[in-house]
Image (cartoon, helix red, strand yellow):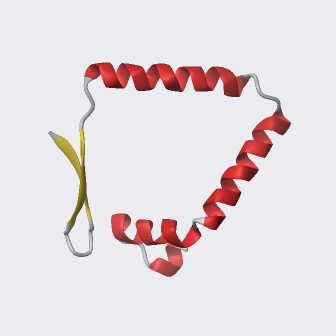
Amino acid sequence: MSAKTINPTTEELLFEIPYMSEKEVEEKIETSNKAFQIWKNMSFEQRGECMKNLVKIMSEKREELAKLNTIEMGMLYLDAL
């Protein structure tokens, strides 16, 4: 089985993502927990730098992300942008 991503405007199947096994889910949870342990021990300034970096990356990929929102969620491109 898999999860399907469908363009809400055209109903075109964009892609399918297979469901994870229970073991894979447990591994993802463990990885997330390890990341959280690191995150919670970072200073506010360090977290701020991470967030600034995220904003920079998202700004650089702005048009790509807007196109994705348009295709996957049916948003108007200018609204997504």
Where is the C terminus found, in terms of image quarters? bottom right
Residue found 54% across the figure and 21% down from its top:
33
Residue found 42% across the figure and 66% down from its top:
68
Indicate the position of residue 5 as horizontal and vertical percent values. 27, 56
Residue found 37% across the figure and 65% down from its top:
73
**Closer to us: 28 or 7:** 28
Indicate the position of residue 9 as horizontal and vertical percent values. 26, 74
Horizontally, residue 49 falls left or right of residue 71, namely: right
Residue 7 lies in what quarter of the image? bottom left
Outermost residue toward the left? 1
Q: How many marks?
A: 0
Residue found 45% across the figure and 23% down from its top:
29
Indicate the position of residue 39 as horizontal and vertical percent values. 69, 28
Residue 57 lies in what quarter of the image? bottom right
Outermost residue toward the right? 45
Horizontally, residue 6 falls left or right of residue 69, namely: left
**Closer to us: 27 or 77:** 27
- In this rendering, the answer to whether 34 lies above or below 14 is above
- In this rendering, the answer to whether 48 lies above or below 31 is below
- In this rendering, the answer to whether 25 lies above or below 14 is above
Where is the N terminus found, in terms of image quarters? top left
